[in-house]
Amino acid sequence: MTPPDELRSSLMQLLETEALFGIRELPVRRGVDTAKPARPSREVRIPSAPAAEPAAENNTARLRVLDEQQVKGCQKCGLHQGRTQTVFGQGHPSARLVFVGEAPGFEEDRTGLAFVGRAGQLLTNMIQAMSLTRDEVFICNVLKCRPPNNRDPAADEISACSPYLFEQLSIIQPEVLIALGSPAAKTLLNTGESIGRLRGRFHDFYLSGLPGVGAAVPLMPTYHPAYLLRNPADKAKTWDDLQKVMAKLGLTARKRT
Ligand code: URA
Ligand code: SF4
């Protein structure tokens, strides 16, 4: 390619990524929206089990027991003191794809739901760009309580809380995992490697917690949406990562118009 072609092509890529999950271009829909979608999708739906199926019902019950009997009243680390409420996570109880973030922020602590603030809006756009909806995937965090002023999770908080995450994953049994940002990737992969070096390829996640024991689940680390809000130029790399996950799940991207 000649330099102007190269420039045009990387500009096009940037624009496409922005259109796919740029927060300004694709606002989340609030309430009932009867307007025709500006960007019709090819309606590729993830073929997960409908919620009424016995496996999903059973998972819903097991997740509820974990939440209500263990997480909601948990005082295993100091973060219980400052929380309004715990944030268990939400979505499809037998989702093929699970997103793992870091910890609840202000809005999450207030509402009890994972990823509902500004980073959550960008995550919604990312999920929609993958031709999925939030209801079809499961979204949760390493920590279930908000750290004061959204500071980074401490090592003792991660070790106190991560058994809940591992239990959630062993109930849901996803086919693929996406770790959003460094704390999620490091916790799930038990590594100190930076997110910049981990992202872009699948790693083996072992539900058993023991490398090499039991089945491995492919895990894609990528940038956290809050980081992408501050560094939008890295959205293109995240879109590459998400496309690899789509290929793994047999999903087709929304048709570009
Ligand atoms: N950031 C996270 O990591 N998780 C949330 O739920 C919200 C913001
Ligand atoms: Fe318990 Fe996790 Fe909350 Fe700490 S962050 S109190 S371990 S639920």
Image (cartoon, rainbow, N blue to C red):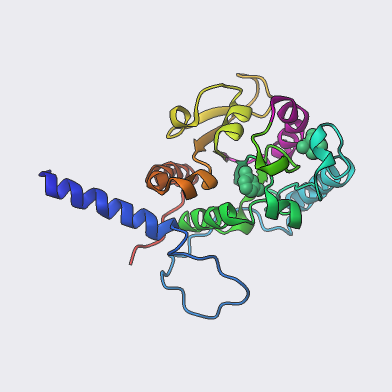
Task: Give the answer, above or below, for where 103 lies relative to 212.
Answer: below
Residue at 87% x, 36% y: name it. Answer: 75
In percent of width and height, residue 145 lies at 76, 42
Q: Is residue 57 left or right of residue 242?
A: right
Does the rendering let one see residue 226? Answer: yes
Stretch in magenta: 154-176
User: Is residue 135 inside the magenta stretch?
Assistant: no
Q: Is residue 39 left or right of residue 189?
A: left
In percent of width and height, residue 5 lies at 14, 49
Does the rendering let one see residue 139? Answer: no
Q: Name the image quarter holding the C terminus.
A: bottom left
Task: Give the answer, above or below, for where 87 lies relative to 196.
Answer: below
Q: Is residue 65 left or right of residue 38?
A: right
Residue at 67% x, 33% y: name it. Answer: 153
In percent of width and height, residue 156 lies at 74, 25
Q: Name the image quarter holding the N terminus.
A: top left
In percent of width and height, residue 211 lies at 62, 19
User: Is residue 159 inside the magenta stretch?
Assistant: yes
